[in-house]
Image (spheres, rainbow, N blue to C red):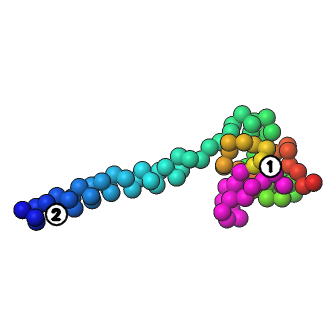
Amino acid sequence: MSVNRTRRNFLKTASLSFVLVPLVVFSRHAGATVNSDMRAQLKYQNSPKDNMNCTTCLEFIPGKTDKAMGRCKVIPEDDEISPDGYCTKWNTM
């Protein structure tokens, strides 16, 4: 009997893990938010304008790496700001 219970517990745990792993992976991506209205107002674009880009802007909050998406103090509730992006609020002072 203990062999059957052990096997049953293993199968329950394995099936639960099989279900939960994709949820954890997808939940990381589900947390990304974009503030489309504010982006439109500030004419945000994912590419630089001349020598102006988010990396050189004082309002930019960088991501974990140099190429990772970051945030902006001027565009609330948006964590998909490109380091190479640009908007009309670009600021170096």
Q: Residue 45 carries which label?
A: none
Q: Which tag, 2 or 1, sits closer to the chain's start?
A: 2
Q: Where's the N terminus, which quadrant?
A: bottom left
Q: How crowded is mark 2: few (under 14 residues within 10 Å), some or many (20 or more)?
A: few
Residue occupying the point 68% across, 39% down: 35
Q: Work out which residue is located at the far front of the displayed protein and give it.
A: 2
Q: What element carries label 2?
A: helix
**Where residue 56 sits: x, y (%)?**
83, 59
| Along the viewing direction, whichever of 52 and 76 lies nearer the viewer | 76
Q: In which quarter of the image is the C terminus?
A: bottom right
Side (left or right) of 42 relative to 20 = right
Q: Across the whole image, how many numbered discs are drawn on residues?
A: 2
Residue where numbered disc 2 is placed: 6
- The vertical placement of 31 against 41, above or below, is below
Indicate the amino acid at tag 2.
Thr
Describe residue 53's horizontal placement relative to residue 37 as left or right.
right
Q: Nearer the viewer, mark 2 or mark 1?
A: 2
Q: Which residue is drawn at 68% across and 62% down?
A: 67
Residue 58 percent coordinates (x, y): 84, 55
Q: In the rendered image, is residue 48 in sight?
A: no
Q: Name the residue under label 1.
A: 86
Instruction: Name the residue at 27% across, 58% down.
Output: 13
Q: Is residue 64 magenta?
A: yes
Mark 1 is on which residue type?
Tyr
Q: Is the magenta stretch mostly helix, strand or loop?
A: loop
Q: Can residue 32 be seen in this view?
A: yes
Question: For the residue labelled by badge 1, is the local secondary structure a helix, a strand or a loop?
Answer: loop
